[in-house]
Amino acid sequence: QVQVAESGGGLVQAGGSLRLSCAVSGSIFRINDMGWYRQAPGKQRELVARITSGGSTNYADSVKGRFTISRDNAKNTVYLQMNSLKPEDTAVYYCNALIPVGVSEYSYWGQGTQVTVTS
């Protein structure tokens, strides 16, 4: 069993900062890519940022320069530092982890954490 648990969401004013954390636990040998996605009301889930096991990153254009993704492989944890938050960043943020099992790779999701940015 693999569990993915996000934390760190909340309510913040525009221009403020939040740091999201996501811990992956269970029977894990290694984790490939980890990432953060978000879904605003009435919209599709979209990629925010991803990071490989080696530390390579990619970001959505809308968050470049404001958000930073990082990971601690020893703790099976990924973080998302969000600065200069805007009301349009309001969404439920989901953590995703790709875990290899044999020749296959499985995608695991957390339950999500709400981020609300007020103007």
Image (cartoon, rainbow, N blue to C red):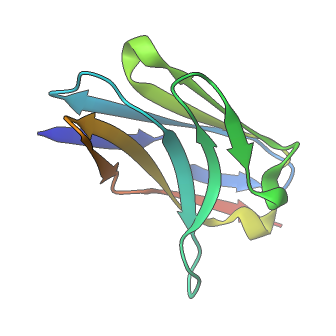
Check the image and report above or below for 63 versus 97: below
Residue in view at x 65 percent, y 55 percent? 48
The x, y position of residue 104, in whole percent, is 25, 45
Q: Residue furthest front?
A: 103
Q: With 116 as the anchor, is 97 left or right in this view? A: left
Residue at image position (62%, 24%) is 55
The residue at 39%/42% (across/down) is 97
Residue 96, above or below 71:
below
Q: How many marks?
A: 0
**Residue 33: x percent and y percent?**
48, 38
Residue 80 vertical placement versus 74 (above, below) = below
What is the residue that sits farthest to the bottom in this orientation?
42
Say if residue 47 shows up in the picture: yes
Q: Quadrant of the rendered structure where residue 80 is?
A: top right
Q: Is residue 42 left or right of residue 49?
A: left
Tell me: residue 76, above or below residue 83: above
Left or right: residue 13 compared with residue 97: right
Along the line of sight, the residue nearer the viewer: 71 or 13: 71
Q: Quadrant of the N terminus?
A: top left
Please state if 16 lies on the left or on the right of 100 as rendered. right
Q: Nearer the viewer, residue 56 or 95?
A: 56
Q: Position of residue 81 (x, y in %)?
A: 69, 35
> Whole-percent x and y of residue 107?
33, 51
The answer to whether residue 85 is seen in the rendering is no
| Residue at position x 24%, y 29% in the image | 25
Using the image as rendered, state which of residue 66 and residue 116 is in the foreground.
66
Q: Quadrant of the C terminus?
A: bottom right
Please, which residue is most extreme toward the top here?
74
